[in-house]
Image: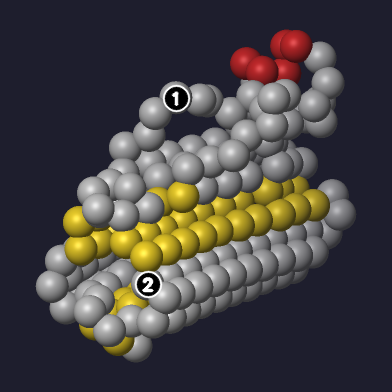
């Protein structure tokens, strides 16, 4: 890593704001207006503040976006792409080749793993961990201290791109505080995973999961309650 003055191939737009003690890898691109707070590190080939490129048929909201903002101590790894209009809280870690699209709000100390894709208009609460190759679809809400295992898939459109009435119904899942979602699980549009719930690996979640419940299988069904020693209030 290099300071701004010596990082090879570094491109920083004139309107970007880069605080002191920010370290850069090689060939980083920082787009217009991007704000990078003190103590951040930006890995090789990362792209910060990218404007979205939308298909003519895209239903994503259009219009001007505020700058990308990185709070102090963020660590952005090689090849990550972070779009304009999003904010990352203090101490976030973004893995290699991960993507955070526009209008996302990421809390403090969130860990975003390698190859994770976070689509537009997603909210992620503080101290949440999102593991390798997970996919968070647009309009998903993830609360604090959630664990999302590798290759989890979330969805937001029951009509898969057909019919006009779908536009008012597009909504990703809501994953409440302290919930855990196992590897390869699939969450259908608009469902809620309750606080401290546990979704087993490979589960297909078709309906809401009550708080404190373990669900497994395809389709997901209740197995038992989450053990007391695994709850956050008991140090789990």
Q: Quadrant of residue 173?
A: top right
**Residue at position x 62%, y 16% from top?**
168
Residue 187: x and y in percent read 70, 48
Residue 61: x and y in percent read 52, 25
| Residue lying at the far left of the rendered structure | 20
In this rendering, would 80 be left or right of 162?
Answer: left
In this rendering, would 19 be left or right of 103?
Answer: left
| Residue lying at the far right of the rendered structure | 218
User: Which residue is at the front of the view, 78 or 138?
Assistant: 78
| Residue lying at the far top of the rendered structure | 165
**Pointer 1: what residue?**
63
Label 1 element class: loop
Crowding near pointer 2: few (<14 within 10 Å), some, many (20+)? some
**Residue at position x 44%, y 24% from top?**
63
Colour mapping: secondary structure
Q: Is residue 175 visible?
A: no
Q: Looking at the rendering, in which quadrant would you find the C terminus? A: bottom left
**Pointer 2: what residue?**
10
In this rendering, would 91 be left or right of 10?
Answer: left
Q: Quadrant of residue 185?
A: bottom right
């Amino acid at each position: 890593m290099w300071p701004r003055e010596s990082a090879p191939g570094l491109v920083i737009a004139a309107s970007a704001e880069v605080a002191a003690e920010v370290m850069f890898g090689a060939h980083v691109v920082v787009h217009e207006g991007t704000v990078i707070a003190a103590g951040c590190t930006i890995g090789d080939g990362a792209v910060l503040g990218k404007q979205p490129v939308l298909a003519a048929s895209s239903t994503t909201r259009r219009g001007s976006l505020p700058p990308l903002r990185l709070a102090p101590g963020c660590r952005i790894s090689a090849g990550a792409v972070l779009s304009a209009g999003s904010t990352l809280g203090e101490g976030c870690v973004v893995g290699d080749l991960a993507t955070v699209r526009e209008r996302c709000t990421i809390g403090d100390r969130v860990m975003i793993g390698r190859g994770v894709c976070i689509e537009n208009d997603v909210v992620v609460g503080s101290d949440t961990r999102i593991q390798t190759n997970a996919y968070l679809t647009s309009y998903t809400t993830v609360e604090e201290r959630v664990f999302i295992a590798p290759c989890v898939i979330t969805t937001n459109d029951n009509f898969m791109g057909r019919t006009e009435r779908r536009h008012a119904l597009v909504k990703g899942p809501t994953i409440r505080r302290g919930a855990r979602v196992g590897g390869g699980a699939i969450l259908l549009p608009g469902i809620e995973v309750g606080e401290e719930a546990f979704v087993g690996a490979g589960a297909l979640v078709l309906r809401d999961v009550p708080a404190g419940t373990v669900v497994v299988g395809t389709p997901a069904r209740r197995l038992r309650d989450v053990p007391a020693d695994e709850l956050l209030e008991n140090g789990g």
